Amino acid sequence: MDHELISSRLGQQIRTRRINRGLTQLQLAELATLTRQKVIAVEKGSLSVGMGAYARVLAALDSEFEVVPAVLPTLDEIEGMFE
């Protein structure tokens, strides 16, 4: 999977979480002790933003990273698991 797609998806998920929490970008920036411009960059999935900024935003949203497979396993790969 393309690294740009991954960061873009992360940014979209962060934006959705912020909106669901009823926060503006400025409010989130204040909670995360970042600038609003940095929050905008995070929500865009910018590759130029450091991991620390992403971590601060996620912490301010009471969220965390989770590593999951990019694709689901095939039936052949899981065939023996339920025997």
Image: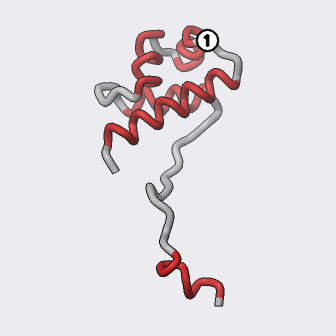
Q: Residue furthest bottom?
A: 83
Label 1: which secondary element: loop
Q: Position of residue 46 (x, y in %)?
A: 35, 26
Q: Is residue 82 left or right of residue 46?
A: right
**What residue is shown at x 53% (from left), y 14% (from top)?**
29
**What residue is shown at x 49% (from left), y 69% (from top)?**
73
Q: Position of residue 43 (x, y in %)?
A: 47, 24
Q: Position of residue 2 (x, y in %)?
A: 31, 46
**What residue is shown at x 70% (from left), y 17% (from top)?**
22
Q: Position of residue 75 (x, y in %)?
A: 52, 77
Q: How is the image coloured?
A: secondary structure
Q: Is residue 17 left or right of residue 6?
A: right
- Relative to 69, say whether 8 is above or below: above
- Relative to 43, say whether 83 is above or below: below
Q: The C terminus lies in which quarter of the figure? A: bottom right
Pointer 1 residue: 24
**What residue is shown at x 54% (from left), y 20% (from top)?**
32
Rate crowding at label 1 as few (under 14), some (14 to 19) or many (20 or more) other CA atoms within 10 Å: few
The residue type indicated by label 1 comes to Thr
- Total numbered labels placed on residues in the image: 1
